[in-house]
Image (cartoon, grey):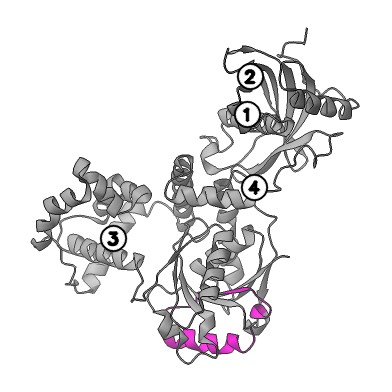
Amino acid sequence: MTKTAAIIGGGVIGGGWAARFLLNGWNVRVFDPDPEAERKIGEVLENARRSLPGLSDVPLPSEGTLTFHDEMAEAVKGATWIQESVPERLDLKLRVYKSLQEECDPGAIIGSSTSGFKPSELQEGALRPEQIVVTHPFNPVYLLPLIELVPTEKNPSEMVARAQDLLKSVGFFPLHIKKEIDAHIADRFLEAVWREALWLVKDGIATTEEVDEAIRMGFGIRWAQMGLFETYRVAGGEAGMRHFMAQFGPALKWPWTKLMDVPEFTDELVDLIAEQSDAQSGMHSIRELERIRDNNLVSMMRALKAQNYGAGAVLNQHDALLKPGALPTLEQADLTQPILTLSRAVPLDWTDYNGHMNEAKYLEAFAAATDRFMEIIGCDMDYIASGGSYFTAENHIRYIDEVHAGARIQIRTQMLLGQGKKLHVFHSMYEGEKLLATGESFLLHVSLETRRPSAPSPEIEAAMAQIAEAQAGLPYPEGAGAAIRKPA
């Protein structure tokens, strides 16, 4: 059954929440009195559709339905999750909770995107304080996994656990903060860095661009995959964290930073920073900067995904939730037709300077389809561990049409030969019904002990015979055999 999320406030953050839920199969209702809300959320969705699905190596659920509502009561009625992202004014948030709690399901979770208010402040005077928690995201909400989940003692543990499960189901990493504090955890770090950066610019030590370069060329990259303490543990060398603390602890007494002293926010300081920022990034529109940001984030997180580390581990966990049922098994497939062996979105890091899929990535996609076909006939990781596998002898790819980032592609596979040690498959890549490319592979079954061709197991032989019989009526594919050896 499709779940429904209500988004109260459709700005940058609310739009990101809407995109995250919508692209993970939820129906989304938006309430925002801003007459431009639909346009703004549409632009956020355009970027999200291009970038988010490519983080997954399996298909996301079918996109939910997005609706806009003139009355908040209409938006929240029957919603499983209600996300409040209105401006940071406590009086406004309390009025919003009063209105929506009169209409919403008592079992719904009400999350606040607040970056500063404590949940106890948000629960004050509420009809049902146990419904309200802080769920503070990070921009772009549709890509970054962190959610600071901050409850109080008024929130039942069962409700907190349910909130964690729902957030994980759409690919978030809910960090359960067990003791509330102003600005939670992450924004307290950001505020410290922001204060020091303002002093560095005001005192003429660095420009806005030089501050940014210091972050993104150095510790920002380290933090992206190891955070703060793990990074410093490594810095301590073989002696570890104790050595690091002993070596650098005395520096805490030195007057390096001005964290407890805030520069006066004068017009001159604002003008100075704004002028330097314009010089640094003014050649790009906001939409262009968002796309640059999304390209970089997706590429970095996919690299972390390959290492199953940091944000990449969260992406792999989300894929594991999505994978069951994404592709058919031998028993589930209609064997009289080419078998679905790959279904996914084209990630941003698969595209080249022309804006379409790099030719090497076609081979990667077809190789993944071949691996899936091997699994279908029984040559899975357990079988390979037992000493047998298929080695590719030849490939032939035809590039028929362009493929762009965000495209939802499928590969369907026809077995042209599956007998003895020989396996010959023909893959067709589609976007909808548009044929994009074909890939043909000839493989030999090999003993991993002797590294020489050998017969597969009787179970694999039987599976190939079943597919061969079912697909016997299919026509020989156009373009097949042009560069593949004919079976002897």
Instruction: Report which residue position mark 1 lands on.
Output: 367
Q: Which residues are magenta?
A: 75-104
Q: CA distance from mark 1 to mark 4?
A: 18 Å
Mark 2–mark 4 CB contact (< 8 Å): no
Rendered residue at 45%/51% (across/down): 311
Mark 2–mark 3 CB contact (< 8 Å): no
Most extreme residue toward the top is 488
Vertical comparison of 107 with 353: above or below? below
Q: Is 77 covered by the magenta stretch?
A: yes
Identify which amino acid the numbered label 4 is placed on.
Answer: Lys
Q: Position of residue 322 (x, y in %)?
A: 63, 51
Which numbered marker is on residue 275?
Answer: 3
Instruction: Report which residue position mark 2 lands on.
Output: 392
Q: CA distance from mark 2 to mark 4?
A: 25 Å
Q: Position of residue 461 (x, y in %)?
A: 77, 23
Identify which amino acid the numbered label 1 is placed on.
Answer: Ala
Rendered residue at 58%/18% (across/down): 448
Q: Quadrant of the N terminus?
A: bottom right
Query: Which badge, 4 or 3, is on the more N-terminal residue?
Result: 3
Q: Nearer the viewer, residue 21 or 472?
A: 472
Vertical comparison of 404 with 229: above or below? above
Identify which amino acid the numbered label 2 is placed on.
Answer: Thr
Instruction: Report which residue position mark 4 lands on.
Output: 323
Query: Dot 4: what SS?
Result: loop
Closer to the eye: label 1 or 4 = 4
Query: Which badge, 2 or 4, is on the more N-terminal residue?
Result: 4
